[in-house]
Image: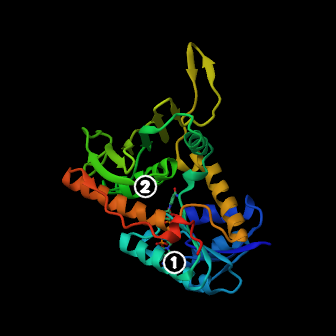
């Protein structure tokens, strides 16, 4: 059975996802596209052999659409996800699930009322081969009980529009989801430290930042966010346990020996770094929609990330270590979103 998909938001990542769903994922067909920019929607629709529709609600309510992909601007996500739940359709929402924790809770409430999991949030690192190998090693007990994690998220440079708060909401949010998933543990404390800033930044920005997280189980994590590091896009993660340590491998590249030097390329962007993870994410999502059992990051994961980001930004502004106040996870999400 082919899953017929409607895309809301034909910008940068909506266009990429549309292409991968059409060219690289078996069993999926994009049948409808919309964007506030009608020309952009028409252009992507033509490329994908789909129909351009006037707005997101037309896509959600189109009887030909089985499942919806939301890739519009963050503040629009909550309304579209709620409308998809109301229509009883599966919805893949790029991060963030919503821009406030309250809106995330409206979504988790609506999904529970619908009685089954319909929502998946686009945290693609869960599909990266290196992170998956790390999770297998942790789950198998290879390193013993995890005690510490060291993470780094470095980008070569960011535009002037990037604000200090985005270090949590747009950058470390990926580490937040990855930490919770890798450790199967909840983040309960956060503190932002601001070292001497790099001179390669716009004046308004705190860069780099170090975010210190603690989990309920007592694991301490340091996340370096350095978005003007100049040299490349570099994602690092090491988990240290009682008996050993497991580290994310560097992406494979040719190693050149020449003139007394050993050289290899450093990737320059997230699209290249996580291309395979995005493909695997959509292949599994389409498969799970067909099976009627979603397996990726849930609406609850989207809610937890929103609260942890909000608390982290408060710590950036106050300099204090803050407790993360999450609601108790409903049974519905503890049981994988099945009634
Ligand atoms: P983008 O290039 O600005 O694309 C968003 C598109 O949505 C734009 O064409 C925008 O039109 C359109 N739009 C805005 N409001 C809309 C509405 N109400 N209905 C329909 N379309 C609407 O942004 P992007 O970089 O693709 O990011 C989109 C989402 O993906 C964001 O939430 C972002 O955080 C997420 N993202 C995730 C990752 C990841 O690593 N998982 C990476 C990149 C982006 P206008 O430009 O005219 O407003």
Residue visible at 52% across and 42% down in the picture: 268
* Quarter of the view holding residue 85: bottom right
- The residue labelled by disc 2 is 173
- Left or right of 91 on screen, residue 241: left
Residue 105 in picture, x, y percent from top left: 41, 74
**Colouring style:** rainbow
User: Is residue 153 or residue 116 the one in the foreground?
Assistant: 116
Q: Secondary structure at mark 2?
A: helix
User: Mark 1 or 2, which is nearer the eye?
Assistant: 1
Whether the residue carrying mark 2 lies under 8 Å from ligand 1 is answered with no
Q: Which mark sits nearer the N-terminus, 1 or 2?
A: 1
* Quarter of the view holding residue 100: bottom left
Q: Quadrant of the N terminus?
A: bottom right
Residue 47 in picture, x, y percent from top left: 70, 69
Q: Secondary structure at mark 1?
A: helix
User: Is residue 151 or residue 291 the one in the foreground?
Assistant: 291
- The residue labelled by disc 1 is 112
Residue 30 in picture, x, y percent from top left: 70, 72
Residue visible at 25% across and 43% down in the picture: 194
Residue visible at 57% across and 24% down in the picture: 263
- Left or right of 272 on screen, residue 2: right
Q: Answer above or below: position of 260 versus 269.
A: above
- Left or right of 332 on screen, residue 325: left
Whether the residue carrying mark 1 lies under 8 Å from ligand 1 is answered with no
Q: CA distance from mark 1 to mark 2?
A: 24 Å
Q: Residue furthest top?
A: 260
Residue visible at 20% across and 50% down in the picture: 319
User: Is residue 290 or residue 33 the one in the foreground?
Assistant: 290
Q: Answer above or below: position of 75 versus 53.
A: above
């Amino acid at each position: 059975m082919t899953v017929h998909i409607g895309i809301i938001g034909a910008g940068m990542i909506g266009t990429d996802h549309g292409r991968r769903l059409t060219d690289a994922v078996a069993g999926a067909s994009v049948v409808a596209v919309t964007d506030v920019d009608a020309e952009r929607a028409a252009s992507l629709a033509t490329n994908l052999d789909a129909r351009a529709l006037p707005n997101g609600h037309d896509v959600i309510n189109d009887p030909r659409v089985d499942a919806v992909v939301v890739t519009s601007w963050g503040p629009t996500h909550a309304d579209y996800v709620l409308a998809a739940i109301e229509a009883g359709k599966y919805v893949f929402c790029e991060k963030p699930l919503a821009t406030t924790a309250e809106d995330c809770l409206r979504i988790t409430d609506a999904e529970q009322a619908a009685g089954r999991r319909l929502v998946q949030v686009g945290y693609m690192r869960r599909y990266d081969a290196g992170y998956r190998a790390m999770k297998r090693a942790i789950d198998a007990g290879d390193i013993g009980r995890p005690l510490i994690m060291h993470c780094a998220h470095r980008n070569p440079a960011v535009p002037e529009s990037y604000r200090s708060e985005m270090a949590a909401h747009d950058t470390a949010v990926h580490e937040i989801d990855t930490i919770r998933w890798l450790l199967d543990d909840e983040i309960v404390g956060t503190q932002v430290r601001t070292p001497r800033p790099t001179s390669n930044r716009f004046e308004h920005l705190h860069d780099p930042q170090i975010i210190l997280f603690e989990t309920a189980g007592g694991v301490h994590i340091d996340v370096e966010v350095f978005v003007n590091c100049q040299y490349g896009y570099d994602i690092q993660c090491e988990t240290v346990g009682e008996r050993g340590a497991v580290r994310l491998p560097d992406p494979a590249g040719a190693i050149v020996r020449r003139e007394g030097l050993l050289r290899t390329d450093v990737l320059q962007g997230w699209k290249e770094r996580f291309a395979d993870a995005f493909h695997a994410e959509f292949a599994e999502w389409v498969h799970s929609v067909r099976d009627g059992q979603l397996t990726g990051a849930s609406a609850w994961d989207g809610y937890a990330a929103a609260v942890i980001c909000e608390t982290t930004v408060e710590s950036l502004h106050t300099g204090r270590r803050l407790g993360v106040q999450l609601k108790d996870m409903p049974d519905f999400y503890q049981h994988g979103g099945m009634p």
